[in-house]
Image (cartoon, grey):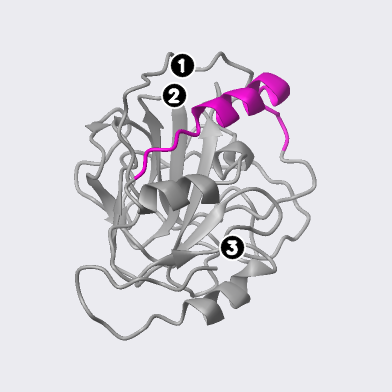
């Protein structure tokens, strides 16, 4: 793991190594072996008045969306003191460690797909569907779905169907869901699947670290080929399998 680099401002070193050690063994929480139906995050729900979601239909395979090849990509957390581990427990994903409250931004131009403004995680309840706490997913113009969870807040106006630009703030780093009380952003790359009960796909299907390494250095490495190849091989699996550790 690289040591955090200090960017625009000087601040006390963030204890990234200790945080990574706390989560690397099990990702963003421990699995209970239960696979429960996910409740669709409501675009109109608030912390004071959660909306009752409708029962979702199982996902089916869908063709990748037509993709732009000229898109710009940026690192998903705008902070000077940030780091991440190249691996993740149970499935491909990356935990990006930064102070709570740091801005989480859109990786690229695209349209907001799903928003969860209510933290429904309960360690006694369904594991997997609600593990992400407050979260946002974005369908980039390149056809890739970019997902971030464990947020402390969602930015005003970030709702399903809203168009956003690369670098636009989506929310703030937090520790909601099964974040184990550690401030970080769970980040996942996946294809958009037809149907809404696909948290096991949305949490991540290819390893993000090589792309994060590029974007952090102002590069523009594209995950399109890898995500498209994964979908051609797997389609949209209708079951999370044995792992219910979700982010």
Q: CA distance from mark 2 to mark 1?
A: 5 Å
Q: Left or right of 137: which side holds 202? A: right
User: x%, y% of residue 153?
Assistant: 30, 58
The quadrant where residue 140 appears:
top left
User: x%, y% of residue 92?
Assistant: 63, 48
Q: Nearer the viewer, residue 101 or 3?
A: 3
Q: Compared to 219, does 49 lie above or below?
A: below
Q: Left or right of 159: which side holds 66? A: right
Looking at marks 3 and 2 on the same chain, the residue that comes earlier in the sequence is marked by: 3
- Region rendered in magenta: 219-239
Q: CA distance from mark 3 to mark 1?
A: 29 Å
Looking at marks 2 and 1 on the same chain, the residue that comes earlier in the sequence is marked by: 1
Label ID, residue 28: 3
Q: Compared to 128, does 99 lie above or below?
A: below
Label ID, residue 188: none
Residue occupying the point 59% across, 30% down: 226
- Determine whether label 2 and label 1 are within 8 Å by CB: yes
Residue occupying the point 63% across, 51% down: 128
Q: Quadrant of the N terminus?
A: bottom right
Does residue 231 show up magenta in the picture?
yes
Q: CA distance from mark 3 to mark 2?
A: 26 Å
Residue beneath label 2, please? Answer: 143
- Determine whether label 3 and label 2 are within 8 Å by CB: no
Q: Nearer the viewer, residue 51 or 230?
A: 230
Q: Nearer the viewer, residue 184 or 240?
A: 184
User: x%, y% of residue 130?
Assistant: 55, 52
Residue beneath label 1, please? Answer: 65
Callout 3 environment at 10 Å: few (<14), some (14 to 19), or many (20+)?
many
Q: Compared to 239, does 133 lie above or below?
A: below
Residue occupying the point 61% across, 40% down: 206
């Amino acid at each position: 793991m690289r040591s955090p680099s200090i960017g625009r401002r000087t601040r006390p070193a963030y204890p990234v190594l200790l945080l990574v050690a706390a989560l690397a063994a099990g990702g963003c929480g421990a699995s209970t072996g239960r696979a429960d139906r996910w409740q669709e995050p409501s675009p109109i729900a608030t912390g004071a008045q959660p909306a009752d979601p409708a029962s979702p239909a199982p996902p089916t395979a869908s063709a990748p969306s037509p993709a732009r090849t000229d898109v710009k990509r940026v690192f998903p957390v705008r902070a000077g003191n940030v780091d991440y581990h190249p691996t993740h427990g149970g499935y491909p994903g990356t935990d990006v460690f930064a102070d709570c409250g740091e801005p989480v931004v859109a990786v690229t131009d695209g349209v907001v797909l799903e928003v969860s403004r209510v933290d429904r995680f309960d360690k006694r309840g369904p594991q997997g569907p609600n593990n992400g706490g407050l979260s946002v997913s974005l369908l980039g113009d390149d056809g890739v779905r970019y997902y971030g969870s464990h947020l402390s807040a969602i930015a005003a106006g970030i709702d399903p169907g809203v168009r956003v630009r690369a670098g636009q703030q989506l929310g703030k780093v937090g520790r909601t869901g099964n974040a184990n009380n550690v401030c970080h952003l769970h980040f996942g790359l996946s294809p958009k699947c037809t149907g809404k009960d696909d948290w096991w796909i949305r949490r991540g299907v290819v390893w993000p670290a090589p792309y994060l390494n590029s974007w952090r250095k102002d590069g523009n490495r594209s995950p399109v080929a890898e995500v498209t190849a994964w979908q051609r091989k797997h389609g949209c699996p209708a079951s999370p399998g044995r792992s219910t550790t979700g982010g």
